[in-house]
Amino acid sequence: MRPDILNPLFTDVESLKGVGAALSKPLAKLGLSRPVDLLFDLPTGYIDRTAVPELDVVDVGRVVTVVVTPTEHRLGNGPRSPSRVIATDPAGNIVALVFFRANAGMAKALLPIGETRAVSGKLEHYDQWLQIVHPDVMTPEEAAALPPRDPVYALTAGLTNRRLQALVTQAVARAPELPEWIEPTLLAKNDWPAWRDALVRAHADPTDAMAKDRLAYDEVFANQLALMLLRASSRRRKGVPLQGDGRLRDALELPYAPTGAQARSIAEIEGDLAQPRPMTRLLQGDVGSGKTLVATMALLAAVEAGAQGALLAPTEILARQHHATFVKTLAGLPVNVAILTGRDKGRVRESTLMGLADGSIDILIGTHAIFQEAVCYRRLGLVVVDEQHRFGVAQRMLLQAKAERPPHLLVMTATPIPRTLTLSQYGEMDVSRLDEMPPGRQPIETRVLSGARIDEIADALGRHVASGGQAYWVCPLVEESEVSDLTAAESRAATLRERFGDKVGLIHGRMKGPEKDAVMAAFQRAETQVLVATTVIEVGVDVPNATLMIIEAADRFGLAQLHQLRGRVGRGTGKSTCLLLRGDGLSETSRARLALMRESNDGFRIAEEDLRLRGAGEMLGTRQSGEAQFRIASPEKTAALIETATADARLLVDRDGGLDGPRGQAARVALYLFERDAAVGLLRSG
């Protein structure tokens, strides 16, 4: 249960004075649905509202606050005509206060003739007049009470900065004094203020680095503590040791000997499976490093020990691809592999559910449908999760809390993850790394070309297709809109079809499952030779004959995403090429990003550079993952604070009595405040 002291922060935003259904809509667009959201919505900048005794042309372009006396109203003739109030400052300088689209009554009411008012806004020079457009108007007393730095917040249509400021003030007024959860010597060393004081200061003065550091630290600390508790809970729980006898793995005919990294990872996983506590291991491997083989060996070990295995894929396309790969790889072995996705209905679904319940299905592959309540396993021993960034901490906690005897958990990602993010997102896990490539895997030649050379690129594609090759053509991320991405893809596909006819296929996120499967199957069978795709679809299909990847407007993508897309080629023995088409007027960051892609195929190096170059931008596609990200701590701040926060959380768990000691009781409040409280429930159930 959430501590009562925090309840006022977690009510609906409409509990704040002046917020009704109309105002709650723009607030919801900004993710501000509760007072606590307003607390953590820190200013993005500030306006210097330092008062000036009189107006001066040297201040043109600056925001000024000055006391004036209105002398004349010049009201607009119609709704499109501006209203002007002519006023003088104490030195007699004349200024025009301009209001566009305002009704005449508003200007008159705000600035009555002969009555002194303070106005604040950007001073401009227009047609020999000094003017301020849409000034903030207040009494001189109110102006005197203004902070010199007026915070500015991210806004949306229907919401003004002044309105949002007022709501933040109400939310801050609800924030209670909380007991201290930071270790005392660490607090003293950094000279950080108390939590509530830091909150007040960060909203009052956006340049207060110490207050913002304190709040960022709190958020990272709560996250690391939750992961520590999850790990501790996992280690206390009794799982089922799985000791395979090797009969299935020995019978498996492999096309090549495992790499040293694969052999090491397989041995680590086998060691974990044999333990009575459930494994929680992250398998990091670059595109093409052979994660599927490692997962296959782990699942066979579980089956040898009499347990069932499940492989969870993020999309239906990837689930069906995995299923086809497993069926082919395990052909001839006495292993029953089945698939279950949201699309499977009727008798097929019933048959699969019965096979799971009676134990006749050994390995189940599917989407999130494999964990629905109706799905019952006879003896689920190992869960493998593909593309871990789609399956966050909250889902891992739920999976662990749901099972009476929790299964072993192996999670895989083809997105190499910087150490900072590994600690902040997977801190409760042991980590295996596949940092070698299987033999025969060739580096992909990457070239950066101007998008203006699109005709030459189409000619090169023509030669590639004529020689029997296949290619992907990824369309640009137009904006944060599936609709406009789709429009770009449809337009490109239409252009290419004029030249190549039915050899061009199109796939996008709005297509229904069977449509996607049909397009993918046609591409795999080489019935189509060019696959045009939007970025909303994971083009995770293994087509060894596809050796050309063309990415339009590559400068709009992050490094990790470019690297993932590039990894769709280079899967066969043929030489593969990736063409990155850039726009004009590249930023320094875009230039550095594309240069790195050209010179390196190393995903781990690329991931570290992505974190450095993108800064506070969304990392590794986590924006689409549904995982709750840090609201205050930017990636740079997280990188700076993560080691300290992890050590502090470990100290609390190991030395300071966990959540039962005095500091632990305070830390329990922090877990609820930063919504990492699922860890508290795990602690109880552990």
Image: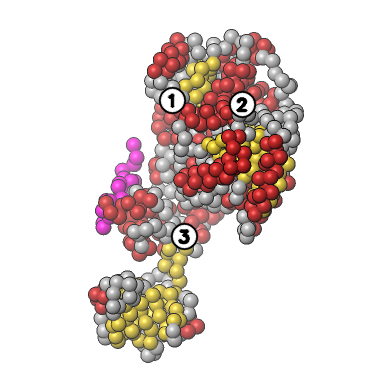
Residue 214 x, y percent position in the rendering: 49, 53
Residue situated in front as seen by the camera: 214 or 272 = 272
Corner quadrant of residue 158? bottom left
On the image, numbered disc 3 is attached to which residue?
A: 44
On the image, numbered disc 2 is attached to which residue?
A: 525
> Which residues make up the magenta segment?
1-20
Residue, x 45% and y 81% (percent of image)?
125
User: Which amino acid lies under the numbered mark 3 shown in the image of this protein?
Assistant: Thr
Q: Helix, strand, or loop for circle 2? A: loop
Residue 302 x, y percent position in the rendering: 57, 16
Query: Does label 2 or label 3 sit earlier along the sequence?
Result: 3
Residue, x 63% and y 29% (percent of image)?
526
Crowding around mark 2 (Cα neighbors within 10 Å: few <14, some 14 to 19, many 20+) is few
Assess whether residue 283 is covered by the magenta stretch.
no
Q: In this view, does 100 lie above or below 258?
A: below
Cα–Cα span, label 3 and label 1: 44 Å
Crowding around mark 1 (Cα neighbors within 10 Å: few <14, some 14 to 19, many 20+) is few
Cα–Cα span, label 2 and label 3: 52 Å
On the image, numbered disc 1 is attached to which residue?
A: 343
Residue 648 x, y percent position in the rendering: 53, 43
